[in-house]
Amino acid sequence: MARIIDAPLTGSEASGCDPRAVHGSWGALDAAARRGLAYDAQVRAETDALYERVKHAIPAIEWPAYAPLIAAINRMKRAKNAVILAHNYMTSDIFYCVGDFRGDSLQLAREAAETDAGIIVQAGVRFMAETSKCLAPEKTVLIPDLRAGCSLAASITGADVRLIKARYPGVPVVTYVNTTAEVKAESDVCCTSSNAAAIVEWAARTWNSDRVILLPDEFLAKNVAAQTGIKIISWHGRCEVHERFTVEDVAELRAAHPGLIVLAHPECPPDVMAAADFAGSTAALQDYVVEKRPGKVVLLTECSMSDNVAAAAPDVDFIRPCNLCPHMKRITLEGIYDALAEMKHEVIIPEDVRVRAKRAIDAMLALPKEKPHAFETGRAEVAVELV
Ligand code: SF4
């Protein structure tokens, strides 16, 4: 079975955590009891098979705390024709035991557009729920916790984008999906970390422009500029999880774990990307581990990723640096249960904003479906113009 080895980092401001401590078995036990749910024979029969997917992450003694909520959520989904879209950064109890569709932002956006379900519960952050609502306006989209935000989405507004467009007329605007619907509505096309380089190249060709505006992640913009050679104009947004990783962390990890393979997400700073062995979106990182089966690996991204990839690569050891996203961790089993039971919190977007945001998302989805892009590591940093 895969081993998960926590590696608190000293070179960065890594948060250091156990993702299960955020939800915690005692918390789940208490939450289940308060909702009149217990671990009985029926719950055991309904959840035993699910435990096999998460036994590397949840000790057997704690399972009776999670199982009643999991069984109740799965029953409610069937009764209400609901699906749960679970992002890669969800804890394993949510990701494997109640998630119907799992993946990165791009994969979840495609599922939202195609599902026949009447209700979508977004096990992710608010901008993801807004993307689902943009693509599936006839469906009820629920976000279990209204506080599940994102430092990137909060960094820029639609008014900011209008000012940037006025300053650079004719230059195509690509926005990362980690933005509000209001920001997407001001954009020509969206991108994710899976397809950012391809979309920027496509936008430069389509608009016949030597420059592209790529908002709002400064580091993603620099990393895409290093891959594509296209001049990029960007913004000072940063992911509060990935910006914490440093080259000192990478050196420290390699020294402590000889033979370690270092994988980085493109929201990391460019010097961290250059020091990694492989870089790409969460989907690309998962594919790399599953296909290459490195003996020992570290994923420089949100810490729940390691637990979730471990289920698909049981022979790999994961060194987990434990930078958690406080927004993603707002989403809990009890929050999902309450969202479905009480039909809260429904995501509503003004129709004119939704239609314009959908246009930008559709422009991305219309491009050919490709394997998640792998960023070439070791490249020199390229400057981008920050507005
Ligand atoms: S991990 Fe970073 S980009 Fe993702 S939701 Fe959290 S703050 Fe936003």
Image (cartoon, rainbow, N blue to C red):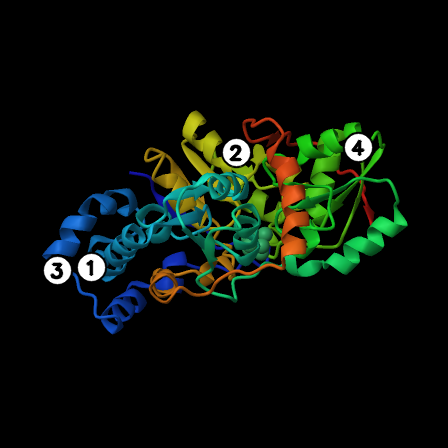
Q: Earlier in the sequence, mark 4 or mark 3?
A: 3
Tell me which corner region of the image, top left, top right, bottom left or bottom right, holds residue 170.
top right
| Location of residue 30 (image quadrant) | bottom left
Q: What residue does disc 4 label? A: 230
Q: Please report contact status of discs 4 and 1: CB closer than 8 Å, yes or no.
A: no
Disc 2 residue type? Ala
Question: Residue 80, how many percent across, how many down?
Answer: 32, 54
Mark 2 burial class by Cα count in 10 Å: few <14, some 14-19, many 20+: many
The answer for how far apart the CA atoms under marks 4 and 1 are is: 53 Å
Viewer-nearest of labels 3 and 1?
3
Mark earlier in primary sequence (4, 2) = 4
**Viewer-proximal residue among 11 and 47:** 47
* Residue 121 visible in this rendered orientation of the protein: yes
In the picture of the structure, the residue carrying the numbered disc 3 is 40
Q: CA distance from mark 1 to mark 2?
A: 34 Å
Q: Is residue 296 left or right of residue 234?
A: left
Pointer 2 or 3: first along the chain: 3
Q: Secondary structure at mark 2?
A: helix
Judging by the rendered image, the residue that carries numbered circle 1 is 64
Residue that badge 2 annotates: 284
Type of residue at label 4? Ile
Residue 387 visible from this viewpoint: no
Q: CA distance from mark 4 to mark 3?
A: 60 Å
| Residue depicted at x 54% and y 40% | 106
Locate ligand 1 by image quadrant: bottom right
- Label 1: state its secondary structure: helix
> Which residue is at a point 53% across and 51% down the rendered structure image?
137
In the rendered view, tell whether residue 45 sits above or below residue 191: below
